[in-house]
Amino acid sequence: MALSKLLPVSLILSFLLLQHLIEDNQLVSSEGLHGSLNVEKIDCNEACDVRCSKSSRPDLCKRACGTCCQRCNCVPPGYSGNQRACPCYYNQITHGGKRKCP
């Protein structure tokens, strides 16, 4: 008897929880915090020109930076370092296991 009363109550609570989770996900998606649908593309050429301006091999740097920027839509600030500011940029590696992005 108790089981027959518990089942409908648990179904209703599960439905309410599911509805709440769906609404939260839609709110996050509409604010652009979820996924990359609402993200503006950055100017990779300009960002990489700045990033590679003090490099000893600027053409090589710009080519690698441009590839990483196209994939990640992000270039870390400054001339070097700060790669963790862009996780996708930071995680790009070569076949040899070295960091791909300058």
Image: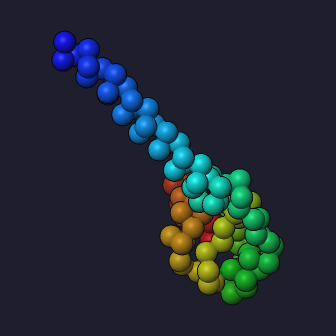
Where is residue 43, by image quadrant?
Answer: bottom right
Q: Position of residue 12 (x, y in %)?
A: 39, 29
Query: Height in image: 65 above or below 77?
Result: above
The residue lying at 18 percent from left, 17 percent from top is 2
Q: Is residue 80 left or right of residue 71?
A: left
The residue lying at 71 percent from left, 61 percent from top is 39
The residue lying at 74 percent from left, 77 percent from top is 47
The residue lying at 77 percent from left, 65 percent from top is 41
Q: Observer-nearest residue: 18 or 63?
A: 18
Residue 56 visible? The answer is no
Q: Observer-nearest residue: 101 or 6?
A: 6
Query: Height in image: 65 above or below 81?
Result: above
Q: Quadrant of the C terminus?
A: bottom right
Q: Position of residue 84 (x, y in %)?
A: 50, 70
Where is residue 66, by image quadrant?
Answer: bottom right
Where is residue 94, by image quadrant?
Answer: bottom right
